[in-house]
Image (cartoon, rainbow, N blue to C red):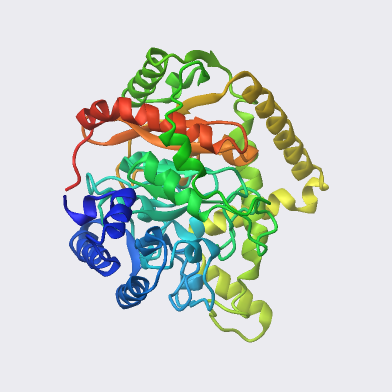
Amino acid sequence: MNITEMTVAALTEAIEKRELSSREITEAFLARADETEPNVNSYITLCREKALEAADKADKNDVPAIKKIPFAVKDNVAYDGVRMTCASRMLENFVPEYTAEVVERMGGIVLGKTNLDEFAMGSSCEKSLFGATHNPISYEYSAGGSSGGSAASVKACSAPWSIGTDTGGSARQPSAFCGVVSIKPTYGLVSRYGVAELASSLDTVCPITKDVFDSALVLENIAGHDRRDMTSTEKESYAGEFTSAIKKEYGIRGLRIGLMDGFEKYCDEAVTKSTLHAARIAEELGASVERTEMPSGDETLGAYMVISQAECSSNLSRYDGIKYGYNAGGDDYREIMRRSRSEGFGDEVKRRIMSGCYALSESHGGNFFAGIKGIRSRICREAAALFEKYDVVMLPTAAGCAFRLGSFDTNPTMLYASDMFTVFANLTGVPAIQLPSGGNGTLPCGISLMAAANCDKLLFSVAHTLESEMKNYVASEVGNVR
């Protein structure tokens, strides 16, 4: 098999058997990126020399094989000495002098920094200073967003796995569009140190991989307590936990699975067909599947939008053109701030900052945002009750397959609805895993599985079982990478 088509698990085994070196693997993926990038545009910056230097160092040192595997990093995650742009003019030339915890934990052999919607605000990977990322299966279509570059690099085999971030579905939706796997772990399981903040109570670091086992393998190596992140888990290490849950082959017999009721009215034919197919497979394997209402219904997306925009308006206030970042100049600090923000931020970022500032403004007497937080608390209580009744909840990841690039140019706010199935996991902090479930004959689509907080092991076991059973079906419904 071609090196770039191998899974992380297979590459790790090849290194352990001394069949491949870290440098050979890194060179292969960099060469593949040279082939695919003119059409896909998944990377903002390729770290060729730095990656090869890190690979040579890893080959000389006695480090775990998993840390000799190169990977791609979303460009809102810091890597010492390489610019972190967040796909924005505001940070176009910003070079951090520190490395994110998640990068350090995986050995730091970074192939490159991947494209995203500016400051991770978007669902199409079109809102980037560096142009849109194209779906590797069909270049006319979106790779999804905001982690579109991370998902596309894995699907195009220009990275064995990648780091994405998920605030309301930003890793799961592009993974569904590209036909790869991503897990949004329980909030706090993975350190956010070194990740540019969008909405701090929602942001989660996510691995994006070729299959479920790779997802488990990577997550158990990046999860654990970090003193530099006050929201991180107290547990020091998860080594071996998630892969062992898969290897024990618990399967899904006897589990109670709740299938989101009424999802069909929002979804296209391919998504409806594949979701119902996955539910039937679960039943055939011995699970009890029944329809269930999702907590708070339409309020979930609205609450997410207000909270995410309010928090982003607060977090992005640090970008003033004075301390660092884009400086447009001016006669005094007020003019510098006004001009720098006007020129440095794109339209979507400004739209969300304005909405967030309004939600927090005195115009509402301070009661509006407090009411939204009350709704979130109620949703969390209802979620706890839901997962007392069901072990796992199943629902589509997105309402359709990837859309054509430019589809939402004239009405960008319509794109917000693409998060309708994914935001629940971020609002409540529960884990959710996306896996390919079918397609429309060319483009893939996916389902998501959710479980109670800290039940990530259960999700991996169920997801791996379904993935194995659906593999041939998915292959028959999806086209190949060009």
Above or below, 134 relative to 439? below
Instruction: Choose top left, top right, bottom left or bottom right for residue 39.
Output: bottom left
Q: Residue at x 47, y 60 (%)?
A: 118
Above or below, 254 relative to 47? above
Q: Residue at x 56, y 16 (%)?
A: 292
Is residue 415 in view from this perspective?
A: no
Left or right of 435? Residue 377 is right
Q: Residue at x 55, y 52 (%)?
A: 223
Residue closest to the eye, 245 or 451: 245
- From this viewpoint, which residue is outermost toward the bottom? 331
Residue 117 picture location, percent across and down? 44, 56
Above or below, 69 relative to 445? below
Instruction: Choose top left, top right, bottom left or bottom right for residue 29.
Output: bottom left
Q: Residue at x 34, y 23 (%)?
A: 274
Left or right of 21? Residue 312 is right
Is residue 166 in view from this perspective?
A: yes
Residue closest to the eye, 277 or 299: 277
Q: How many marks?
A: 0
Above or below, 348 relative to 307? below
Residue 231 picture location, percent across and down? 68, 54
Residue 375 picture location, percent across and down? 72, 34
Residue 449 picture location, percent across and down? 48, 30
